Image (tube, rainbow, N blue to C red):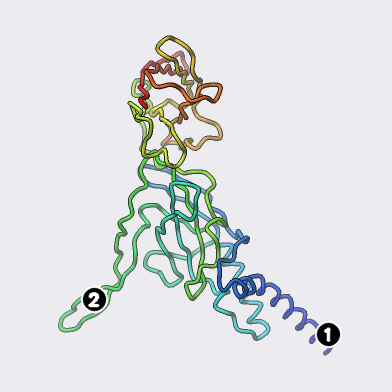
Amino acid sequence: MRSSVFNQMSLFLLVSALALLFIAPAAIAQAQIVAGHPDFVISSFVCTDRDIRFSWTNNVEQRLAHVADSLHGIGQSVPDSLKFGGYRLWRGETRDTSKMILLREFTMADTVSWTFVGSTRSFSDPDSIFEIKLVKTIVGFDSAFVRLRIKVDVPGPYNGTGYFYAVTYFDSTGTQRSSKADCFTSFPAHAVADQDRGLEKVWVVPNPYHGSAPWDVSEGRRIQFVNLPDNCKVSIFTVNGDLVRVLHHPDIGGYFNYGDFGGALNWNLKNENGKDVMPGVYIFYVEAPANETYQGHFVIIR
């Protein structure tokens, strides 16, 4: 009998300790976001034409479910702060999470647009950006409310621009329980159009470059070589024949290895010594396997 009581008390203390990890910070900080618990990470990016798709695991749902099972096992009720409510999806053009816009909110009850099945959650930007609203309609002589998908007017994602994403979760009351920094892309993702890999189709965007471009916000000043073959070297020269920079495609460790949608390569407008290049006309020379070559030019204006 004593052993049974001791086991129940031990279990209660363990569960209480787990619960305090989430309840205590909220109580002390008056329901501020509980940070420092990255239960899930964004992964499995797929970038296509004006579309970026990514996934993450349901670890936070599983953890809260285990805590709830433990509390139920000792006859305790589950506080709202430990009841999973849903996810919020965020997007920004810089690493500053405070400037991210809310793309979409998914709740456990949002069965029309979201299915909580399996261990992986996924999101498609912009295909998944819509709201579910109850719209009153007339059926015969009666009125009824139906659930309709309403498209949200959020621009992008545009090809070539780098985007950062974050996922947060909230409890059953709608209170956010994680920080955007807990589940956040530390590198930018880029939507990209399908490219023609013909060497004669290689070109530079933007051309001319006027000192800034809309996509510079996410990663700083850059131009992009597009329609590159699978493997090649890009050499950049001044009109006087001086070598400025040598680039290799694909850029191992870069952000532009898109598989079937590949063929894009960035240049940050710096020479081999890391110095900004001067305004002017530049020649680029592409060398591909089988001794294939292509030459073109672009202009930098400031």
Query: Is residue 8 shown left or right of residue 36?
Result: right
List x then y, in percent, for residue 294.
39, 16
Instruction: Tell me the crowding category of disc 2: few under 14, some 14 to 19, or many 20 or more residues within 10 angstroms, Cα based.
Output: few
In terms of sequence position, does the residue under pointer 2 or pointer 1 come before the other? 1
Query: Is residue 210 shown left or right of residue 62?
Result: left
Q: Quadrant of the C terminus?
A: top left
Residue at the front extreme, as displayed? 302
Q: Looking at the picture, which amino acid does disc 1 mark?
A: Ser
Residue at coordinates 60% horizontally, 84% vertically from top-left? 77
Residue at the left extreme, as displayed? 141
Q: Are marks 2 and 1 in contact (CB under 8 Å)?
A: no
Q: Is residue 119 above or below residue 95?
A: below
List x then y, in percent, for residue 204.
37, 26
Residue at the bottom extreme, as displayed? 1
Q: Nearer the viewer, mark 2 or mark 1?
A: 2
Residue at coordinates 24% horizontally, 79% vertically from top-left? 144
The foreground one among 118 and 226 is 226
Q: Quadrant of residue 7?
A: bottom right
Give the SS element for disc 1.
Answer: helix
Label 1 belongs to which residue? Answer: 3
Q: Quadrant of residue 197?
A: top left
Q: Quadrant of the N terminus?
A: bottom right
The foreground one among 13 and 282 is 282
List x then y, in percent, for residue 123.
44, 55
Give the SS element for disc 2.
Answer: strand
Q: Looking at the picture, which amino acid does disc 2 mark?
A: Lys
List x then y, in percent, for residue 209.
36, 28
Label 2 belongs to which residue? Answer: 136
Q: Is residue 127 above or below residue 273?
A: below
Alpha-carbon span between mark 2 and mark 1? 60 Å
